Image (tube, rainbow, N blue to C red):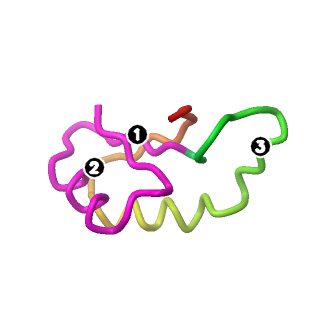
């Protein structure tokens, strides 16, 4: 499953997006998730970057990486 992360540079997002089929998982934030996670910070811009890299559906979620 392809995963786009907030730390991926534009070239890596384009590489992932170009190879994607079905959908791309977009990790909503970097680091450890928890109840103090504020998803409003940076997520809209991150999703715009992801959308610019692929036309397949995007799945937004959490991943510890």
What is the span of residues highlighted in magenta in the rendered image? 1-27
In the image, residue 54 above or below residue 35: below
Mark 3, residue position: 37
Q: Is residue 30 left or right of residue 59?
A: right
Of tags 1 and 2, which is closer to the observer? 1
- What is the CA distance from the residue labelled 1 to the residue labelled 2? 10 Å
- What is the CA distance from the residue labelled 1 to the residue labelled 3? 18 Å
User: Is tag 2's residue or tag 3's residue first in the polypeptide sequence?
Assistant: 3
Quadrant in which the N terminus appears? top left
- Image position, residue 58 (x, y; %): 40, 46
Of tags 1 and 3, which is closer to the observer? 3
Of tags 2 and 3, which is closer to the observer? 3
CB under 8 Å between callouts 1 and 2? no
Mark 1, residue position: 25
Q: Is residue 54 left or right of residue 3?
A: left
Dot 1: element:
strand
Point 50% across, 56% down: residue: 6
User: Is tag 1's residue or tag 2's residue first in the polypeptide sequence?
Assistant: 1
């Amino acid at each position: 499953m392809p995963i786009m992360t907030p730390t991926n540079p534009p070239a890596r997002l384009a590489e992932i997006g170009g190879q994607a089929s079905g959908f791309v998982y977009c990790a909503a934030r970097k680091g450890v998730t928890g109840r103090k996670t504020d998803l409003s910070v940076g997520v809209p811009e991150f999703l715009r970057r992801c959308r610019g890299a692929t036309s397949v559906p995007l799945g937004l979620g959490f991943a510890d990486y």
